């Protein structure tokens, strides 16, 4: 009888569930819910919230769809893993009831709070002990609640990340991980414990943090009530949890210094592993505890992930698709890609700055919005517009990648899942030749990575090597010297325009 692992990927657009067969390490079925993107609430400019109960509803729907598609009995699922959108805040009371909508990753309201803490606590203290500015992260978001919604804060028993909330709904236990606390800039790397000085500064009680559990290990067991709703077996271990970017790196077997992963979904990320407690003096990129850091109990070595994030990548491409029509209907992505490919490299001077999804860390938490520059009504058409959007996203990633290089994180190969914007041949070409590194695409995704992580955490797999036996490389993209020169010229034009805006 076959046995399976179940992985969830709690994104801001949808919830994805994947079933992985233990013996082969291969995905037998995946399902996502909803089919269209989940809504975000933006009551004020720069705000972004979601209802956690909506996540739970779609966890149930994606689970049922996945089991049905695979024709698998839920009793054969041996372990559950969770990947989730990073940096979000969920507040619950002592009865585990959600007190307000989740303030999610791209919400910018706490920027000034983090900036003030950076100065008052001391920049060197924050960089050397937290490896980041407190910035617009989870701790700063909870401080915003304390300042602006004191009636809510007074009821907060526990603050959680989105993945902690999902685990709570599954098990009834409120736990988090060291990696998760580092996402909220609530982790002191020198002490390898919660950042008490920052907590004290923000007026957050250490007791409001969940209990810390290992990234790989039994973090809770599926409660009878949740098992009934999901069609699974009560007592099934929840044995892995990680934010979406550390988990994406894990799903690509990116675990060692110098190894680098990338994604280009709603946001775009380059995530590079280091064996140092490294930081950027301007906190333009951020360091987090990686899934196999010694702090999470899987090794005796430092393993941190340095993350460059561009908020407006796939969401900009999605905006473009929704607002582009042909013959009265919105184009699909394949059509947009084919039209874009007819324009020359550099889009004939048309420049797009893809910063329309909140404050950007790589721009030192500025919010400069998305914009188009150099548009000539006599020269530019739809192909130039479509291409300039994809090139603008790549150029923004290059801008941040150079910060990683300045920190000494050198890489010649970047791994990514064969998904989202990496499905576009034009995007891949621009990415490889602008970044200047080989690109390897693999048949994996966040939900599958979470499932494999659960297999490791439950002891079903005895090593990472065993877990990745089914990882398959789909393609490799190499740098083309002649195209690289053209892309460098186009990037310089883009960079000049960005500098004018800053």
Image (spheres, rainbow, N blue to C red):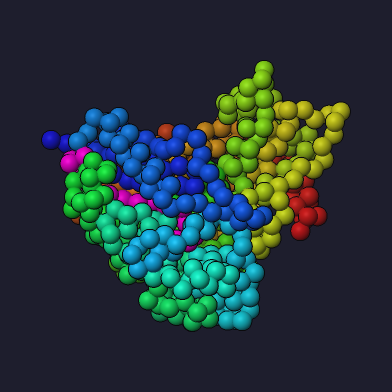
Is residue 464 left or right of 385 when viewed as pictured?
A: left
Which span of residues is magenta-colored? 74-90
Most extreme residue toward the top is 327
Which x, y percent locates residue 445? 40, 42
Residue sitting nearer the eye, 405 or 298: 298
Could you say which quadrant of the image residue 314 lies in?
top right
For image coordinates 71% across by 28% down, the residue present is 383
Residue farthest right in this picture: 378
For image coordinates 39% across by 70% down, the residue present is: 157
The answer to whether residue 309 is magenta is: no
Residue 76 part of the magenta segment: yes
Vertical placement of residue 114 versus 458, above or below? below
Q: Can see residue 137?
A: yes
Q: Quadrant of the image for the N terminus?
A: top left
Note whether 294 is above or below 221 in the view shown. Answer: below
User: Does residue 298 appear in this view?
Assistant: no
């Amino acid at each position: 009888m076959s046995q399976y692992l179940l992985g969830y990927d709690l994104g801001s657009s949808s919830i994805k569930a994947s079933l992985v067969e233990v013996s082969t390490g291969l995905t037998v079925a995946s399902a996502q819910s909803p089919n269209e993107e989940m809504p975000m609430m933006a009551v004020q400019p720069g705000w972004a919230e979601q209802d956690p109960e909506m996540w739970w509803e779609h966890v149930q729907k994606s689970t049922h769809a996945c089991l049905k598609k695979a024709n698998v009995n839920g009793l054969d699922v041996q372990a559950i893993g969770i990947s989730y959108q990073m940096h979000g805040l969920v507040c619950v009371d002592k009865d585990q009831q959600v007190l307000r909508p989740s303030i999610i990753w791209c919400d910018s309201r706490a920027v000034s709070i983090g900036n003030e803490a950076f100065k008052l606590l001391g920049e060197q203290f924050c960089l050397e002990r937290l490896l980041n500015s407190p910035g617009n992260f989870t701790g700063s978001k909870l401080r915003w609640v304390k300042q602006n919604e004191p009636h809510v804060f007074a009821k907060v028993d526990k603050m959680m990340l989105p993945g902690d909330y999902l685990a709570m709904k599954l098990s009834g236990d409120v736990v988090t991980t060291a990696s998760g606390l580092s996402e909220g800039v609530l982790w002191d790397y020198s002490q390898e414990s919660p950042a008490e000085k920052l907590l004290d500064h923000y007026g957050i009680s250490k007791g409001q943090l969940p209990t810390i559990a290992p990234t790989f290990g039994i973090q809770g067991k599926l409660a009878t009530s949740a098992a009934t709703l999901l069609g699974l077996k009560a007592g099934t271990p929840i044995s892995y949890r990680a934010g979406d970017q550390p988990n994406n790196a894990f799903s690509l077997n990116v675990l060692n210094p110098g190894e680098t992963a990338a994604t280009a979904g709603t946001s775009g990320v380059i995530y590079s592993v280091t064996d140092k407690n490294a930081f950027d003096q301007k906190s333009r990129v951020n360091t987090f505890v990686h899934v196999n850091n010694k702090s999470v109990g899987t090794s005796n070595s430092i393993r941190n992930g340095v993350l460059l994030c561009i908020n407006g990548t796939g969401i900009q491409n999605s905006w473009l698709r929704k607002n582009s029509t042909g013959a009265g209907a919105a184009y699909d992505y394949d059509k947009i890609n084919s039209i874009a490919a007819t324009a020359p490299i550099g889009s004939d001077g048309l420049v797009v700055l893809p910063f329309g999804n909140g404050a950007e860390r790589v721009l030192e938490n500025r919010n400069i919005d998305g914009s188009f520059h150099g548009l000539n009504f006599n020269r530019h058409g739809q192909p130039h517009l479509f291409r300039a959007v994809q090139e603008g996203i790549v150029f923004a990633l290059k801008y941040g990648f150079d910060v990683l290089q300045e920190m000494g994180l050198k890489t010649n190969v970047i791994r990514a899942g064969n998904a989202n914007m990496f499905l576009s041949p034009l995007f891949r070409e621009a990415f490889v030749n602008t970044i200047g590194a080989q690109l390897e695409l693999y048949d994996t995704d966040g939900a599958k990575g979470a499932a494999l992580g659960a297999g490791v955490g439950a002891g079903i797999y005895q090593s990472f090597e065993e877990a990745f036996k089914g990882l398959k490389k789909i393609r490799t993209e190499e740098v083309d010297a002649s195209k690289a020169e053209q892309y460098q010229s186009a990037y310089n034009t883009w960079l000049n325009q960005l500098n004018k805006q800053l």
